[in-house]
Amino acid sequence: MWCTACKKYDKTGNKNTFVTGCTSLRIGNVKKHEKSPIHKITVKKVQAENVPVQQRPMQRALLRMEKKKVEQMKSLFRTSFFLAKKGRPFTDFPDVMRLQKSNGVDIGETYLNDKEARVFVDFIYKDMRKKLCTKIKESDFIAVLSDGSSDRGSIEEEVIHVRYLQDNMEPATVFVALKPLERGDASHITEAVVSALEEDLELGDSWKDKLTFACFDGAPVNMGHVSGVGVRLQEDCPHLIVLQCCAHRLELVFKDVLKEVPYFSTVHDMFTTVYKFYDNSPLNWQGLKNAGEALNIQVLKPTKASGTRWLPHQERALKAITRDHPALVQHLGELVEQGAVGSGDSRDKARGILEVVKSVKFVLFTLFLASYLDLVCSVSRVFQDNESTVESVFRRVESVVKSLTKMCSPLKLTRIMSEEIEERDGTVLWKGTTLQTGRPQRGRRSDLVTQREEVIRDCQQILNSTLHHLGRRFDAMLNQSVLSAARVFQFSSWKEEDEDQEDEDWEEDKLRTIYRHFRRPLELKGFQLQGALREWDELKTVCRAQLANVRRPPSFKDFWVSMLRREEEEYRNVFQLLRLVLTIPIHTAECERSFSLMNRVKTDWRSCLDPKCLTSLMTISLSEQSIETFDPEPAITYKPVVVSREATTFNHPLWAQATSSPSSHFRYELRRGTVRFVIRFWLQ
């Protein structure tokens, strides 16, 4: 007879017959052994062994300690996210943590310096990049957008974005990486783009089958037909279609027109002169505001019309002059008449500006320019919108061509130029200001009618030149075979069902065109052409039924994304072609916005930020997460973090591992000087 507890735990070496085996079965011997001190100790050990691991005193204390540490780490990660989101330097981290400590937040005593803040930001970025890589791998097709610029450290940087389909349905454009270049030539840019696809997005060689479109700003290094970046990418990806940014195309149209019409260029230069006159002199700007207050006008400060890339800046510069014209004329008149105010140079400039802005020709031209820029800038805004698709390009270009053609009519132009202009006894008034008609020339009168006829000729030249250059810049893009074939999904141009028979062959040809160009990537996804042709007619019937039930036609993107969500399995083949169309990028405006962010983050005081750290900061700043929605736990659990040699080494979080793994090994290490304490335990 043996005592199980004593046999297992009695290691004293003293004589104990219940360990070696007792031959006596008397009840007295058993009771005597039960009351012995050694037996009581071994029984307690057995009882302790049967207690669940999480309920043991040592483990419970350690888990409480680790949970507290995790909460402290969350505070540190949230603060680091806040600094990166707002573009603040890492050196703000210790001060912010001291503020939190003063407010009673438990943040611990370690990791409270700017070096650790950078490590936390790096782990937040890695977690975000991991999620992005997963989403992009789920997308059947992607497009790359790229542009280059120099940062504050005089380093040539290439910013790279990717357009993909979230959940393989909804198009989205995201920032990928900022790549430093040794030289801004085609070979180095191509290497940077491929590196972003292979390494940053972890696609390896699979990018060659997923990449379908590339969009650049139109620079020869990108769009060159012999050795440009697009041509080099097509060597590895033959089906790739290289596009030029539509917003840049429209900007070039405006610049071409500016060169061909002399008076247009004169007015544009006047915008710049007015801007510099008030921007370089606080005294002049204060005088303009005082003149506005006297006339009950809240004046706009004249803005810069040149040196910026997008057309809406031209519209804002025009608005600052035309809306506040009475205040502008009054202030300039005061400068000219009162010799004691301002310098002689300022008075001479004011006299020259006043002579132009009070002329009838200038006012008539700005009235036309307001309508012209309103039309062109509305198109530019669409071409910079992330929600825009290739359907938007077709629709807006056709719309602006029709509107410009109608505007060419002399009657239409006369109506535009007659707005608020009055003529009384040979005096021309606009907004209460007397305008100057100029001196009469030999054989020509100088009145409102004559000035209007002259301006109408300039305006017609501008409109005709704009139509010409729009065709020159956009026809090649819109007539490209695949982009033209993509119009088959433009439901706004579908004919009625009873008139649709004659267009069936045309639509099938368009679907075949898309298939022939992207044959390899489509077949890798299991695409079947005959299945797509069979599904097309049925899909159109379903779409017509959906459109008939809505009062207002939905946008191209919203309609097709909703159809993808509802009918994905029903029309699998034809939706593969639709995904290609939704992936088409039409602009690189996101790259330009990223450069603006880069200059806000990498300032003159942070010019030594390396590109990897800058990429991490920009990724966090451009993310959709806010301070309220940011969850630090995924970043904390991304991998074990060891961020200090003299402080606590923390493998996190113990409580999460304990609930997710049936058998976990935990290690908590404390260092104090040269002494190291290590606590290990296992959860079974």
Image (cartoon, grey):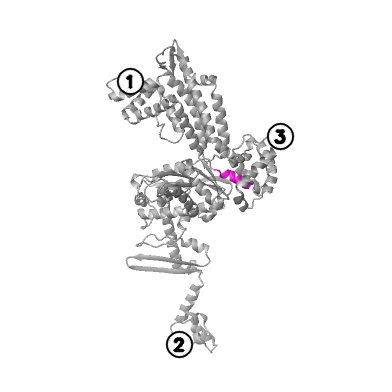
- The magenta span reads 575-584
Tell me which numbered mark, 2 or 1, is placed earlier along the sequence: 2
Task: Look at mark 3 in the image and give the residue it sits on.
Answer: 499
Number of numbered markers: 3
Task: Look at mark 1 in the image and give the residue it sits on.
Answer: 334
Helix, strand or loop at mark 3: helix
Identify residue type, mark 3.
Glu
Magenta: main secondary structure equals helix
Task: Check residue 15 in the rendering and tell me which mark sits there, or answer none.
Answer: 2
Q: Nearer the viewer, residue 259 or 194?
A: 259
Above or below 318: residue 148: below
Of tags 2 and 1, the one toward the viewer is 1
In space, the residues marked 3 and 2 are separated at their CA atoms by 107 Å
Residue 605 coordinates in the image, percent (x, y): 33, 46
User: From the viewer's perspective, is 256 left or right of 673?
Assistant: right
Identify residue type, mark 2.
Lys
Helix, strand or loop at mark 1: helix
Tell me which numbered mark, 3 or 2, is placed earlier along the sequence: 2
Quadrant of the frame with the N terminus = bottom right
Q: Nearer the viewer, residue 550 or 306?
A: 306
Identify residue type, mark 1.
Glu
